Amino acid sequence: MTFTTSLVIPAYNESLRLEAGFERLRPVLNEMNPELVEVIVVDDGSRDDTMHVAQRVYGHLPNVVFIQHPENRGKGAAVRLGISVARAPYVIATDADLSIRPVHLPEFVLALRDSPLVPGSRQLDGDDGYDTFVRTLAGRVFNRLVRHYTGTTSRDTQCGCKGFQLGPARILALLAFYDRFVYDAEMFFLADRLGLTIRPLPVTWDDIAGSSVHVGRDSLQMIRDLRSLKHRKYENPVVELDAAVGVEEVERAARSVRVQGLVIARGTTNALVVLPRDGAVAGVGIAAALGGTLRTAGLAELRGRPYDAVTSYQY
Protein backbone atom coordinates (compact mmCIF):
# COMPACT_ATOMS: atom_id res chain seq x y z
CA MET A 1 0.00 0.00 0.00
CA THR A 2 1.28 3.46 -0.95
CA PHE A 3 0.32 6.23 1.47
CA THR A 4 0.48 9.97 0.95
CA THR A 5 0.44 10.95 4.61
CA SER A 6 1.22 9.45 8.01
CA LEU A 7 -0.71 11.07 10.86
CA VAL A 8 1.03 10.56 14.23
CA ILE A 9 -1.17 11.09 17.30
CA PRO A 10 0.61 10.93 20.69
CA ALA A 11 -1.81 10.34 23.56
CA TYR A 12 -1.38 10.36 27.33
CA ASN A 13 -4.47 9.95 29.52
CA GLU A 14 -6.63 11.11 26.61
CA SER A 15 -9.58 8.74 27.00
CA LEU A 16 -12.00 11.65 27.51
CA ARG A 17 -10.83 13.66 24.48
CA LEU A 18 -10.06 11.10 21.78
CA GLU A 19 -13.58 10.70 20.46
CA ALA A 20 -14.22 14.44 20.14
CA GLY A 21 -10.83 14.81 18.46
CA PHE A 22 -11.71 12.17 15.90
CA GLU A 23 -15.04 13.84 15.14
CA ARG A 24 -13.08 16.99 14.32
CA LEU A 25 -10.80 14.93 12.07
CA ARG A 26 -13.41 12.74 10.35
CA PRO A 27 -14.60 15.10 7.55
CA VAL A 28 -11.06 16.11 6.59
CA LEU A 29 -9.88 12.50 6.65
CA ASN A 30 -12.69 11.57 4.28
CA GLU A 31 -11.64 14.43 2.01
CA MET A 32 -8.00 13.22 2.02
CA ASN A 33 -9.11 9.61 1.32
CA PRO A 34 -8.62 7.27 4.32
CA GLU A 35 -7.09 4.65 2.03
CA LEU A 36 -4.13 6.97 1.47
CA VAL A 37 -3.65 8.10 5.07
CA GLU A 38 -1.81 6.05 7.69
CA VAL A 39 -2.93 6.86 11.25
CA ILE A 40 -0.47 6.00 14.04
CA VAL A 41 -1.76 6.34 17.61
CA VAL A 42 0.96 6.16 20.29
CA ASP A 43 -0.28 5.66 23.84
CA ASP A 44 2.47 7.09 26.03
CA GLY A 45 1.96 4.83 29.05
CA SER A 46 -1.46 6.19 29.98
CA ARG A 47 -2.96 5.36 33.37
CA ASP A 48 -6.53 5.43 32.03
CA ASP A 49 -8.11 3.43 29.18
CA THR A 50 -6.67 5.59 26.39
CA MET A 51 -5.62 2.59 24.29
CA HIS A 52 -9.02 0.90 24.57
CA VAL A 53 -10.80 4.12 23.55
CA ALA A 54 -8.32 4.76 20.72
CA GLN A 55 -8.97 1.30 19.30
CA ARG A 56 -12.72 1.86 19.49
CA VAL A 57 -12.56 5.31 17.91
CA TYR A 58 -9.90 4.75 15.25
CA GLY A 59 -9.98 0.98 14.81
CA HIS A 60 -12.36 1.00 11.83
CA LEU A 61 -9.91 2.94 9.64
CA PRO A 62 -8.26 0.96 6.83
CA ASN A 63 -4.68 1.90 7.80
CA VAL A 64 -4.22 2.36 11.52
CA VAL A 65 -1.41 1.37 13.88
CA PHE A 66 -1.64 1.31 17.68
CA ILE A 67 1.55 1.40 19.76
CA GLN A 68 1.86 1.62 23.53
CA HIS A 69 4.77 2.62 25.75
CA PRO A 70 4.82 0.42 28.87
CA GLU A 71 5.30 3.56 30.97
CA ASN A 72 5.02 7.30 30.44
CA ARG A 73 8.09 8.70 28.71
CA GLY A 74 6.88 12.05 27.36
CA LYS A 75 5.32 13.51 24.26
CA GLY A 76 8.62 13.79 22.43
CA ALA A 77 9.34 10.09 22.88
CA ALA A 78 5.83 9.22 21.66
CA VAL A 79 6.13 11.39 18.54
CA ARG A 80 9.56 9.93 17.72
CA LEU A 81 8.23 6.39 18.08
CA GLY A 82 5.44 7.23 15.65
CA ILE A 83 7.93 8.72 13.20
CA SER A 84 10.09 5.59 13.42
CA VAL A 85 7.29 3.40 12.03
CA ALA A 86 5.72 5.91 9.62
CA ARG A 87 5.81 4.92 5.96
CA ALA A 88 4.32 7.84 4.02
CA PRO A 89 6.52 10.55 2.44
CA TYR A 90 4.84 13.20 4.60
CA VAL A 91 4.34 12.95 8.36
CA ILE A 92 2.08 15.20 10.42
CA ALA A 93 2.23 14.99 14.21
CA THR A 94 -0.84 16.40 15.93
CA ASP A 95 -2.29 16.42 19.44
CA ALA A 96 -5.01 13.91 20.32
CA ASP A 97 -7.63 16.61 20.80
CA LEU A 98 -7.02 17.95 17.27
CA SER A 99 -7.09 21.48 18.68
CA ILE A 100 -5.34 22.71 15.54
CA ARG A 101 -8.26 22.64 13.16
CA PRO A 102 -7.91 19.58 10.90
CA VAL A 103 -8.97 21.63 7.88
CA HIS A 104 -5.29 22.65 7.73
CA LEU A 105 -4.00 19.09 7.20
CA PRO A 106 -4.19 19.19 3.36
CA GLU A 107 -2.36 22.53 3.52
CA PHE A 108 0.47 20.85 5.45
CA VAL A 109 0.72 18.18 2.76
CA LEU A 110 0.98 20.80 0.01
CA ALA A 111 3.60 22.82 1.91
CA LEU A 112 5.69 19.70 2.56
CA ARG A 113 6.25 19.24 -1.16
CA ASP A 114 8.69 22.16 -1.00
CA SER A 115 9.94 22.23 2.59
CA PRO A 116 11.31 19.49 4.86
CA LEU A 117 9.80 20.97 8.02
CA VAL A 118 6.44 22.75 8.22
CA PRO A 119 5.43 23.68 11.79
CA GLY A 120 2.00 25.11 12.44
CA SER A 121 2.07 28.67 13.71
CA ARG A 122 -0.75 30.27 15.67
CA GLN A 123 1.26 33.49 15.79
CA LEU A 124 0.94 33.91 12.02
CA ASP A 125 -2.80 33.49 12.37
CA GLY A 126 -2.80 36.18 15.03
CA ASP A 127 -4.15 34.21 18.01
CA ASP A 128 -1.96 32.12 20.29
CA GLY A 129 -3.91 32.94 23.46
CA TYR A 130 -4.79 30.18 25.92
CA ASP A 131 -7.85 30.02 28.15
CA THR A 132 -6.05 31.80 31.01
CA PHE A 133 -3.80 34.84 31.13
CA VAL A 134 -1.13 32.90 33.04
CA ARG A 135 -0.85 30.19 30.37
CA THR A 136 -0.81 32.78 27.58
CA LEU A 137 1.94 34.82 29.26
CA ALA A 138 3.98 31.71 30.12
CA GLY A 139 3.73 30.49 26.53
CA ARG A 140 4.97 33.77 25.09
CA VAL A 141 7.83 34.08 27.57
CA PHE A 142 8.88 30.51 26.93
CA ASN A 143 8.87 31.11 23.16
CA ARG A 144 11.22 34.05 23.62
CA LEU A 145 13.54 31.80 25.61
CA VAL A 146 13.37 29.13 22.90
CA ARG A 147 14.37 31.65 20.26
CA HIS A 148 17.22 32.86 22.46
CA TYR A 149 18.68 29.41 23.17
CA THR A 150 18.05 27.74 19.80
CA GLY A 151 18.51 30.59 17.35
CA THR A 152 15.23 29.87 15.59
CA THR A 153 13.16 32.73 14.21
CA SER A 154 9.90 30.78 14.48
CA ARG A 155 7.42 32.56 16.72
CA ASP A 156 5.33 29.55 17.75
CA THR A 157 7.62 26.64 18.53
CA GLN A 158 5.11 24.90 20.83
CA CYS A 159 2.24 24.52 18.35
CA GLY A 160 0.85 20.99 18.64
CA CYS A 161 0.75 20.32 14.90
CA LYS A 162 3.93 19.93 12.83
CA GLY A 163 4.61 18.48 9.40
CA PHE A 164 7.77 16.76 8.17
CA GLN A 165 9.10 15.09 5.08
CA LEU A 166 9.79 11.54 6.24
CA GLY A 167 13.57 11.56 5.72
CA PRO A 168 14.19 14.79 7.69
CA ALA A 169 11.72 13.60 10.35
CA ARG A 170 13.81 10.47 10.85
CA ILE A 171 17.13 12.29 11.23
CA LEU A 172 15.60 14.71 13.74
CA ALA A 173 14.05 11.83 15.70
CA LEU A 174 17.26 9.80 15.77
CA LEU A 175 19.41 12.67 16.99
CA ALA A 176 17.03 14.01 19.65
CA PHE A 177 17.61 13.58 23.39
CA TYR A 178 14.64 15.18 25.09
CA ASP A 179 11.47 13.18 25.69
CA ARG A 180 9.19 15.77 27.21
CA PHE A 181 7.87 19.19 26.33
CA VAL A 182 11.15 20.79 25.25
CA TYR A 183 11.36 18.27 22.40
CA ASP A 184 9.76 20.92 20.15
CA ALA A 185 12.53 23.40 20.86
CA GLU A 186 15.20 20.75 20.34
CA MET A 187 13.68 19.94 16.96
CA PHE A 188 14.09 23.57 15.84
CA PHE A 189 17.61 23.61 17.26
CA LEU A 190 18.58 20.46 15.34
CA ALA A 191 16.87 21.61 12.13
CA ASP A 192 18.97 24.77 12.22
CA ARG A 193 22.18 22.83 12.83
CA LEU A 194 21.38 20.43 9.97
CA GLY A 195 20.54 23.23 7.54
CA LEU A 196 16.90 22.23 7.11
CA THR A 197 14.49 24.81 5.71
CA ILE A 198 11.60 25.66 8.03
CA ARG A 199 8.37 27.02 6.55
CA PRO A 200 5.75 27.89 9.19
CA LEU A 201 2.12 27.42 8.18
CA PRO A 202 -0.57 29.73 9.59
CA VAL A 203 -3.14 27.70 11.54
CA THR A 204 -6.29 28.33 13.52
CA TRP A 205 -6.76 26.57 16.80
CA ASP A 206 -9.26 26.05 19.59
CA ASP A 207 -8.05 25.95 23.19
CA ILE A 208 -9.61 22.69 24.35
CA ALA A 209 -9.66 21.97 28.08
CA GLY A 210 -7.63 19.09 29.49
CA SER A 211 -3.99 19.93 28.74
CA SER A 212 -1.45 17.88 30.72
CA VAL A 213 1.03 20.78 30.90
CA HIS A 214 1.53 22.24 34.38
CA VAL A 215 2.80 25.80 33.92
CA GLY A 216 4.90 26.11 37.09
CA ARG A 217 6.48 22.68 37.32
CA ASP A 218 6.91 22.03 33.60
CA SER A 219 8.17 25.53 32.71
CA LEU A 220 11.07 25.28 35.16
CA GLN A 221 12.15 21.95 33.72
CA MET A 222 11.78 23.29 30.17
CA ILE A 223 14.12 26.18 30.97
CA ARG A 224 16.71 23.83 32.46
CA ASP A 225 16.55 21.65 29.35
CA LEU A 226 16.75 24.66 27.01
CA ARG A 227 19.92 25.86 28.69
CA SER A 228 21.53 22.45 28.22
CA LEU A 229 20.84 22.15 24.47
CA LYS A 230 24.11 23.64 23.26
CA HIS A 231 26.10 21.43 25.62
CA ARG A 232 24.73 18.15 24.28
CA LYS A 233 26.97 15.94 22.18
CA TYR A 234 24.80 15.06 19.19
CA GLU A 235 26.59 12.03 17.80
CA ASN A 236 25.08 8.73 16.63
CA PRO A 237 26.43 5.41 15.37
CA VAL A 238 26.36 5.20 11.58
CA VAL A 239 27.22 2.60 8.97
CA GLU A 240 29.30 4.12 6.19
CA LEU A 241 28.45 2.64 2.79
CA ASP A 242 29.01 3.36 -0.89
CA ALA A 243 27.24 6.55 -1.98
CA ALA A 244 25.09 4.65 -4.47
CA VAL A 245 23.69 2.07 -2.04
CA GLY A 246 19.99 1.43 -2.62
CA VAL A 247 17.30 2.02 0.00
CA GLU A 248 15.95 -1.49 -0.59
CA GLU A 249 19.33 -3.04 0.28
CA VAL A 250 19.44 -1.16 3.56
CA GLU A 251 15.81 -2.05 4.31
CA ARG A 252 16.55 -5.78 3.94
CA ALA A 253 19.60 -5.51 6.17
CA ALA A 254 17.65 -3.52 8.79
CA ARG A 255 14.86 -6.11 8.87
CA SER A 256 17.37 -8.90 9.34
CA VAL A 257 18.67 -7.28 12.55
CA ARG A 258 15.21 -6.06 13.64
CA VAL A 259 15.89 -2.33 13.81
CA GLN A 260 13.51 0.40 12.67
CA GLY A 261 13.37 4.15 12.14
CA LEU A 262 16.64 4.48 10.20
CA VAL A 263 17.61 7.09 7.63
CA ILE A 264 20.31 7.28 4.95
CA ALA A 265 22.21 10.57 4.91
CA ARG A 266 23.63 10.71 1.40
CA GLY A 267 26.82 12.52 0.44
CA THR A 268 28.88 12.76 -2.72
CA THR A 269 31.46 10.20 -1.57
CA ASN A 270 29.50 8.03 0.87
CA ALA A 271 26.12 7.20 2.36
CA LEU A 272 25.68 7.11 6.14
CA VAL A 273 22.98 4.88 7.59
CA VAL A 274 22.11 6.69 10.81
CA LEU A 275 21.20 4.45 13.75
CA PRO A 276 19.64 5.12 17.16
CA ARG A 277 22.17 5.96 19.86
CA ASP A 278 21.70 2.46 21.29
CA GLY A 279 21.79 0.84 17.83
CA ALA A 280 25.48 -0.04 17.51
CA VAL A 281 24.84 -3.78 17.81
CA ALA A 282 22.34 -3.62 14.95
CA GLY A 283 24.88 -1.54 13.07
CA VAL A 284 27.39 -4.39 13.26
CA GLY A 285 24.91 -6.63 11.46
CA ILE A 286 24.11 -4.03 8.79
CA ALA A 287 27.79 -3.30 8.21
CA ALA A 288 28.53 -7.03 7.83
CA ALA A 289 25.61 -7.55 5.42
CA LEU A 290 26.44 -4.58 3.19
CA GLY A 291 30.22 -4.38 3.46
CA GLY A 292 30.19 -1.13 5.40
CA THR A 293 32.07 0.43 8.30
CA LEU A 294 30.50 1.12 11.69
CA ARG A 295 31.55 4.41 13.27
CA THR A 296 29.97 7.58 14.67
CA ALA A 297 28.97 10.86 13.04
CA GLY A 298 27.96 14.24 14.43
CA LEU A 299 25.92 17.21 13.28
CA ALA A 300 28.66 18.75 11.15
CA GLU A 301 29.07 15.63 9.01
CA LEU A 302 25.32 15.04 8.74
CA ARG A 303 24.47 18.64 7.84
CA GLY A 304 23.23 19.51 4.36
CA ARG A 305 22.73 15.96 3.10
CA PRO A 306 19.61 14.53 1.46
CA TYR A 307 17.88 12.11 3.85
CA ASP A 308 16.23 8.89 2.61
CA ALA A 309 13.99 7.10 5.11
CA VAL A 310 14.43 3.34 5.55
CA THR A 311 10.97 1.85 5.99
CA SER A 312 11.97 -1.48 7.47
CA TYR A 313 8.94 -1.69 9.81
CA GLN A 314 6.23 -4.09 8.58
CA TYR A 315 2.75 -4.79 9.89
Image (cartoon, rainbow, N blue to C red):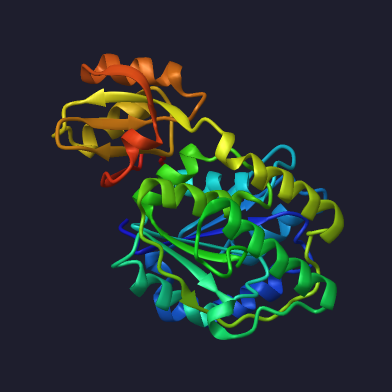
Residue 33 against residue 271 in the figure, above or below:
below
* Residue 87 appears in the rendering: no
Residue 46 % position (x, y): 77, 49
The quadrant in which the C terminus is found is: top left
Q: Quadrant of residue 298?
A: top left
Left or right of residue 156: residue 311: left
Q: Residue at x 77, y 72 (%)?
A: 137
Q: Residue at x 27, y 44 (%)?
A: 305
In front of the other: 219 or 183: 219
Q: Quadrant of residue 268?
A: top left
Q: Quadrant of residue 214?
A: bottom right
Left or right of residue 221: residue 67: left
Residue 101 % position (x, y): 58, 80
* Residue 11 appears in the rendering: yes
Residue 102 % position (x, y): 54, 78
Residue 269 against residue 111 in the figure, above or below:
above
The quadrant in which the N terminus is found is: bottom left
Left or right of residue 158: residue 288: left
Left or right of residue 51: residue 261: left
Residue 141 % position (x, y): 72, 66
